[in-house]
Amino acid sequence: MPVVDHIDYTPPSPRIYLHADTVNSDVDTLDVYREIRALRRTNESHRKFDPVIVAGGNVEKIPGVSYTLPYVQLLHGCRIIPYGGVDHKIRVIRDTFTDDGLAGTGCFDRSSLSVEVDIDIDFSRVEVRIVSTGSSLTQEEHDQLMSLPTAEEILDTET
C-alpha cells in the first residue's frame, strides 16, 4: 500500500501529500520516511532539495538497559497533508514531531482541505528495554540440572 502520493519540496513550506490508500487506515510515518528515502535514492529530481524528513531512535537512555523507540522528524517547516478526496480518519502510530517544536497533529496541515480529516495520535509511549536472555536459574539449580543424566545415558542403561 503506497503511503505517499507526492512531495512538494518548495521552501519555505515543504509538504508531503498522503496517498488515497491512507484513508481510514493506520499511518506509520516511518513508512512515509521509507518511501521518501526510496524516492530520493532512485529519482535525482528529489535529491535537488534538502531532506524534509528523518527517522531515528534506538538512542541509549540508560546505558545497556533502555533505548528510545523509533521516531520520525519533519524538517524545514515540512508538514504532512492528508488525502483530500473524502472525509476520513487516520490513526498515526509513530511518534512524529517537527524541528520547529510541533508534535502529533501539529505535524499535519489540513488548512487546504475541503473535507474533514480526523487525525488520531496513537503510539506506545514506552521505551525499548534490554532484557538479559541468560538463565534465571540459581547456581545450585544449574548444578542440579547438569547432574541429571542425558537421554542417551538413560537409553544406554535400558539396553
Image (spheres, rainbow, N blue to C red):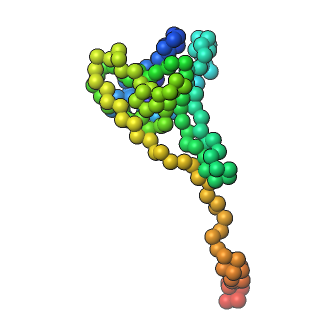
Residue 18 visible, this angle: no
User: In the rendering, at what x and y percent does residue 73 appear?
Assistant: 54, 29
Instruction: Specify the farthest residue to the front.
Output: 101
Can you tell which quarter of the image residue 116 is in?
top left
User: In the rendering, at what x and y percent does residue 97 appear?
Assistant: 50, 30
User: In the rendering, at what x and y percent does residue 58 appear?
Assistant: 61, 42
Q: Where's the C terminus, which quadrant? A: bottom right
Please indicate whether residue 111 sits to the left or right of residue 143 in the image. Answer: left
User: In the rendering, at what x and y percent does residue 52 appear?
Assistant: 55, 20
Instruction: Specify the farthest residue to the bottom.
Output: 158
Q: Where's the N terminus, which quadrant? A: top left
**Residue at image coords 52%, 24%:** 100
Of 109 and 99, the residue lying toward us = 99
**Residue at image coords 66%, 64%:** 134
Residue 58 visible, this angle: yes
Q: Is residue 101 shown above or below 7?
A: below
- How many numbered tags mark residues here? 0
Please indicate whether residue 113 sits to the left or right of residue 101 in the image. Answer: left
Can you tell which quarter of the image residue 152 is in?
bottom right
Q: Is residue 122 shown above or below 9?
A: below
**Residue at image coords 29%, 16%:** 114
**Residue at image coords 32%, 30%:** 118
Please indicate whether residue 151 sits to the left or right of residue 27 in the image. Answer: right
